[in-house]
């Protein structure tokens, strides 16, 4: 008997998909792809929670919806496919088109008031004031049946 080392890349697509238990549902894959389509940086600076999103090639006034509610920032971006003239040959594109949504959980103390956003050179920057309130740890009792 010989042992053959296999990797996930050696498996056929359905088998590989079945081994990826958390991603068995198609909508879970779509959620993952949506998040990958809008990459973000998050950090605290000068009493603000700053979120920077990489969204090049859009018009922020008409292609972006930005909202905050319930401690979550919702960023929705719509990218239109550019049309190429009929003389284009050997066309290939890795650009992503359509609507993409990214949800970012805000830290405790983030104020949903006075949120500011600006767009410059393909980067959308959102500044959310931190009012200084901290989360208090509370131990939750667990009952045994």
Image: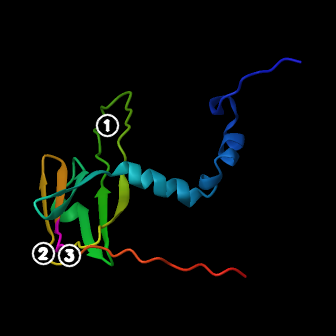
Q: Which residues are magenta?
A: 128-132
Residue 44 visible here: yes
Residue 59 in sight: no
Rendered image: mark on residue 111: 3
Say which quarter of the image contains residue 67. bottom left
Instruction: Give the foreground label among 1 and 3.
Output: 3
Crowdedness of circle 1 by 10 Å Cα count: few (<14), some, many (20+)? few
> Image check: 57 left or right of 78?
left
The image quadrant that residue 27 belongs to is bottom right
* Nearer to us in this view, 90 or 27: 27
Using the rendered view, name the quadrant where residue 94 is placed: top left
- Relative to 118, residue 1 above or below: above
Q: Is residue 121 magenta?
A: no
Task: Name the residue rendered at 68%, 45% in the picture.
Answer: 19
Q: CA distance from mark 1 to mark 3?
A: 51 Å
Residue 61 disc label: none
Q: Nearer the viewer, residue 14 or 85?
A: 14
Q: Which residue is mark 1?
A: 86
């Amino acid at each position: 008997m010989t042992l053959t080392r296999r990797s996930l890349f050696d498996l056929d697509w359905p088998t590989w998909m079945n081994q990826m238990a958390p991603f068995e549902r198609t909508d879970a894959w779509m959620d993952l792809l949506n998040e990958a389509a809008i990459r973000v940086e998050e950090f605290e600076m000068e009493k603000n929670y700053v979120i920077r999103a990489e969204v090049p090639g859009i018009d922020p006034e008409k292609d972006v919806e930005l909202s905050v509610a319930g401690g979550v920032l919702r960023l929705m971006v719509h990218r239109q496919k550019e049309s190429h003239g009929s003389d284009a040959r050997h066309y290939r594109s890795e650009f992503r088109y359509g609507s993409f949504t990214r949800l970012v959980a805000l830290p405790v103390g983030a104020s949903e008031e006075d949120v500011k956003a600006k767009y410059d050179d393909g980067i959308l920057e959102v500044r959310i004031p931190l009012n200084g309130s901290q989360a208090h740890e509370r131990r939750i009792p667990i009952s045994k049946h």
